[in-house]
Every structure is written in C-alpha cells, then in structure tokens.
Amino acid sequence: MTEQPPAAEYRIEDLAHHSGTTVRTIRGYQDRGLLPRPERRGRANVYGAAHLARLGQIAGLLDRGYTLASIKELLEAWDAGRDLGGVLGLVAEIDGPWTDEEASRISRADLDAAFGGISDDAAVAEAVELGVLERVPGRDHEFRVPSPQELAVAAELHSAGVPLPAISRHLREVRGQVEHIASRFLDFTAEHVFHSFLDHPPSEADAVEAADLVRRLRPLAQQTVDAELARAMRTLATRFLRHHLTEALPA
C-alpha cells in the first residue's frame, strides 16, 4: 500500500508567506466569511491546503475587479456545489483585450524627439493623467504606451502645427463622446441580447453562452463607429471644402 504524503499544514504566518498576502488580510477575510476558520489544536490555529487554495481564488477574483462582497457570493455558490468555470470564463472574456493593438514602451528622449525635440514636463504630466502614457516603476525616463496609435496621432497632429494643450482638450472631448457611444451600445445589447442573462444568477450553461456572445459582438461596436466616422468625415469634409471654395471663387 502506497503511503500518502502528510497534508500541508500552516501557521497563519506561514500561510501569509505562501499566499503572498499578510496576516492582517487573512484575518480580515475570516471576519468577512471569505475564508474558513482554521482548525484549533490546543492553543494553536492550523491552516491547510484548502485555505491556501481559497486565498489564491480570492486574489484572482480581486485582480479581475471583483469586490469582496461579490467574491463572497461567488465563493458561497462554489461551496454550495455550483460550477463557476463558465462564470469565470465570461469574466475573462469581458476582461480580455478589446483591440489587437499591443502596448509598447518609449524612452523620454524618444518621446521628446517625437514631439519636435522639446522637453515639456507639463505635457507629459497631462498625457499620464489621460492614460496616454503610464509611468514605469523604478524607471523615471521610460513610459508604457497603452495605445501606440493614439500617441502617434498626437505626434502627427503636433507636427502639423496643433499645440499640445489643444490636443489634450480634443482628446478629453472625444473620449467623453466615445464613452457615451460605448454606454449606448452596452444598453442596446443588454436590452436586446443579454436581457435573459441579467434577471437571475447565470447558470453554467448561461455563462458559457453569454461568453460566446461577448466574443462575437465585441468587434461590432468598433466596426460600427469606424464606418459611421468615415461616412461623417466624408460628408462634412466635402461640405466644408465646397463652402470655402465657393467663398474663395469670384462671383
């Protein structure tokens, strides 16, 4: 008969070390009902592999943006025997990239060069606030660029003579309008596509079906906006040019 290895056992300090969290956090999870109470042995509290696995589940859900209250509901459903694989797959599908564009990095020297060779700390701070640039911890002269296309557009506009403050104001205005469009698209799809999944906790089959719908519908909003923006630019630019040419020509 094969001898079974002894079950893993941890003191709270050891559990915190292996899970990458803190003793205070573990006790907070226990108080909230997220983590089962340890086994009491004499004057010692003993934790096991199930506690370590549960801390890993909590950390993964926090990384995906769940609140502790919603995590508690999910874990209670899990403990009650419900399979959450489909639900977590739906979360991963929504959290996944909504564009094929990949982030890049740029040095401060290359950034200055892209904008005419002038070092403008105020403009850099504005770009960081807008999320066009992200600071890299420990590297003061390097930035992460979430959307290289967006930065390239700003550089091209600047080279054409548009001042940096005007570019920032334009981006803020466009972003507000685009967020409104995104909100309307979500309302539209929620009403006509996802309404059957929203009036009750989704089953495993519901979550799998919803994840497939998200995967299919994800590109539609951008495709619609691209087509409508091209149509509007063509119409308005033609009208603008016709108007100014008419004024410039002799009677």
Image: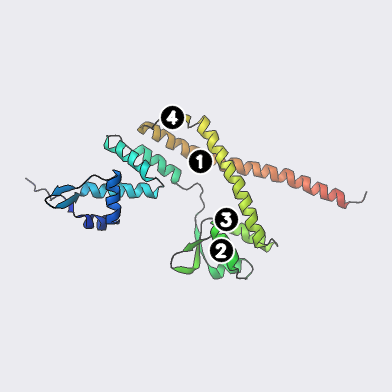
Q: Which badge, 3 or 4, comes first in the chain's sequence?
A: 3
Q: Position of residue 12 (x, y in %)?
A: 22, 54
Q: Residue at x 34, y 38 (%)?
A: 73
* Of marks 1 and 4, the one in the foreground: 4
Q: Which badge, 3 or 2, comes first in the chain's sequence?
A: 2
Quadrant housing residue 212 = top left
Q: Which badge, 3 or 1, comes first in the chain's sequence?
A: 3
What's the residue type where badge 2 is placed? Ala
Q: Which badge, 4 or 2, comes first in the chain's sequence?
A: 2
Q: Position of residue 43 (x, y in %)?
A: 13, 52
Q: Is residue 194 above or below residue 151?
A: above
User: Which of 194/40 is in front?
Assistant: 40
What's the residue type where badge 3 is placed? Gln
Q: Which badge, 1 or 4, comes first in the chain's sequence?
A: 4
Marks 1 and 4, how far apart at CA: 22 Å
| CA neighbours of label 1 inside 10 A, class few (<14), some (14 to 19), many (20+) | some
Marks 3 and 1, how far apart at CA: 20 Å
Q: Which of the numbered marks, if any, corresponds to residue 199?
A: 4
Disc 3 marks which residue?
149
Task: Examine the rendering and report whether any part of residue 132 can be seen.
Answer: no
What's the residue type where badge 1 is placed? Arg
Q: Which badge, 2 or 1, comes first in the chain's sequence?
A: 2
Marks 4 and 2, how far apart at CA: 43 Å
User: Mark 4 falls on what kind of element?
Assistant: loop
- Are the residues flagged by discs 1 and 4 in contact, CB closer than 8 Å? no
